[in-house]
Amino acid sequence: MRTTALFAILSTTLLAACVGTIDRRVDPDSPDAVGGAVLQSQDIRTMAKKMSDDIRAAGVLTSQADGQTVTFHITELKNESADVINRTIILNKLRTELFKALGNKIVVLDRSADGLDAVRKEREAKRAGAVTQNEGMKGGVLGSDYVLKGVIQDRVQQSGKLKSAYYLVTFELTDLETSRLMWTNDYETKFESEKSVITR
C-alpha cells in the first residue's frame, strides 16, 4: 500500500515536471526572458551591426591608394568585466557583418593560433609534395595593414536585492605601420536587475 502511494506521488511529480517544460524558438533580438544584468544576444547582434556599419562609413578599409585591397585581422577582445563572456561569439559576429558590408573590397586575415597552425601545416605538406598545390596561389603569408581589437569593461553596483550593471565595449582599428589609431567606437548598455525575495 505504502509502495503504491509512493509510486503514485513520484509519477505525478514527474508528469508535472514534463508538462511544465517549455521549448520555443524566439527572435535573437528580443529581450531575454531569463533576465540577468549581463550582455544578451540582442546586444551582441546590435553591437556587431553598429560597429560594422560605422567602420564601413569611416572608409578606412576601402581607401587604399592605387587600387590595392586593404588587409586586416581581428586580434582579440579583452574581457575586463566581472562576467564570464564568450568573446569569440562577439568577434565572429563582427567579422561576419564586415564581410557582408564590404565583401571583396577588403581582405580579412585569420591570425588565430588555429588558423596560423593550419596554414603552416598545409604549406609544409605542399612543399614536401604530400599534397598538390594550386600554382596560381603560391606566395607568402599575407601581412596586415590594420588590426581590429576591443575591450569589454563594466561598472556594477549592488544595493540589497537591486543590481545595476553598465557595460562599455570599445573597438579600435590601428595602422600596423604607424601605430596610428584610425577608427574607434564603442557600444554601451545598462541593466537593472531585482532579485526576488523568494529566490535562494
Image (cartoon, grey):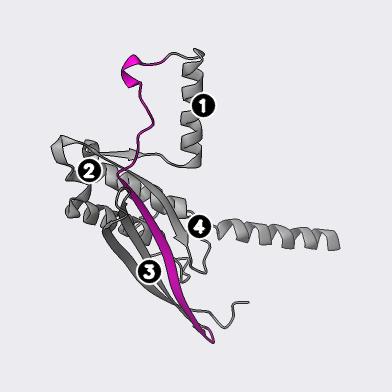
Residue identified by numbered label 3: 168
Q: Identify the residue at horizontal 40%, vertical 70% (top origin).
A: 167
Q: Amino acid at mark 1?
A: Lys
Quadrant of the image containing the N terminus:
bottom right
Mark 4 vs mark 3: which is more N-terminal? 4
Q: Which residues are magenta?
A: 133-161
Q: Residue furthest front?
A: 178
Q: Nearer the viewer, residue 46 or 101?
A: 101
Q: Is residue 63 visible?
A: yes
Distance, label 3 to label 1, CA atoms, is: 39 Å
Distance, label 4 to label 2, CA atoms, is: 40 Å
Q: Is residue 137 magenta?
A: yes
Q: Is residue 92 magenta?
A: no
Distance, label 1 to label 2, CA atoms, is: 30 Å
Distance, label 4 to label 3, CA atoms, is: 33 Å
Q: Position of residue 3 (x, y in %)?
A: 84, 59
Q: Identify the residue at horizontal 39%, vertical 31% (top origin).
A: 141
Mark 4 vs mark 2: which is more N-terminal? 4
Mark 3 vs mark 1: which is more N-terminal? 1
Mark 3 vs mark 2: which is more N-terminal? 2
Which-is-in-front pick, marks 3 and 1? Answer: 1
- For label 4, the crowd category at 10 Å Cα-Cα, with few meaning under 14, some 14 to 19 and many 20 or more, is few
Distance, label 1 to label 4, CA atoms, is: 47 Å
Looking at the image, residue 74 sits to the left or right of residue 23; the answer is left
Which-is-in-front pick, marks 4 and 2? Answer: 2
Q: Position of residue 104 (x, y in %)?
A: 23, 36
Q: Identify the residue at horizontal 38%, vertical 74% (top origin).
A: 190
Residue identified by numbered label 2: 102
Residue identified by numbered label 4: 22
Q: Amino acid at mark 3?
A: Leu
Q: Amino acid at mark 4?
A: Ile
